[in-house]
Image: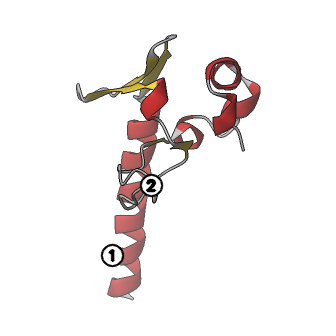
Amino acid sequence: MIGAVATAALFGVLVVKHRRLVAGTVVRFTPEGVELADARGFRVRLRWPDISRIDVVDTQPADPVTGRPEVAIPLGEIDPLWERGPMGDWVRRLRPDLMR
């Protein structure tokens, strides 16, 4: 019983933290690339030519041809409907090859 309560509490804490992270993330698109910034001050800038796909990457797979690490942007984590909105418009315009 105590184990189930502790597991449920831990799961609840993780869900709240994930929601805060996603809610506090800002995505900016420019002709040069994509910038992601969160409420804690973390910021990453990715140039369009360096982005290999749009998805969450749990590991760092490498491109078999170039050997460069794969670079993915997790737009689906920020907005599950990103493909239909302004983020999808940017990707279709500047990197249509990244669309599924």
Quadrant location of the N terminus in the rendered image? bottom left
Work out whether mark 2 precedes mark 1 in sequence or the reverse, and give the earlier one: 1
Q: Give how far across and how far down residue 62 sits, in percent.
A: 39, 57
**Along the line of sight, the residue nearer the viewer: 31 or 11:** 31
Gap in Å between the C-alphas at discs 2 and 1? 41 Å
The residue under label 2 is 63
Residue 5 sits in which quadrant? bottom left
Q: Residue furthest left?
A: 41
Up-down: is 57 above or below 39? Answer: below
Residue ID at (42%, 59%): 12
Specify whether 92 is left or right of 40.
Answer: right
Specify whether 88 is left or right of 3.
Answer: right
Residue ID at (37%, 66%): 9
Q: Which disc, if any, is residue 61?
A: none
Residue ID at (40%, 38%): 20
Up-down: is 51 above or below 67? Answer: above
Amino acid on which the number 1 mark rests in the picture: Ala
Specify whether 30 is left or right of 80.
Answer: left
Report crowding for label 2: few under 14, some 14 to 19, many 20 or more residues within 10 A (C-alpha).
Answer: few
Q: Which disc, if any, is residue 6?
A: 1
Helix, strand or loop at disc 1?
Answer: helix
Report crowding for label 1: few under 14, some 14 to 19, many 20 or more residues within 10 A (C-alpha).
Answer: few
Mark nearest the camera among 2 and 1 is 2
Amino acid on which the number 2 mark rests in the picture: Asp
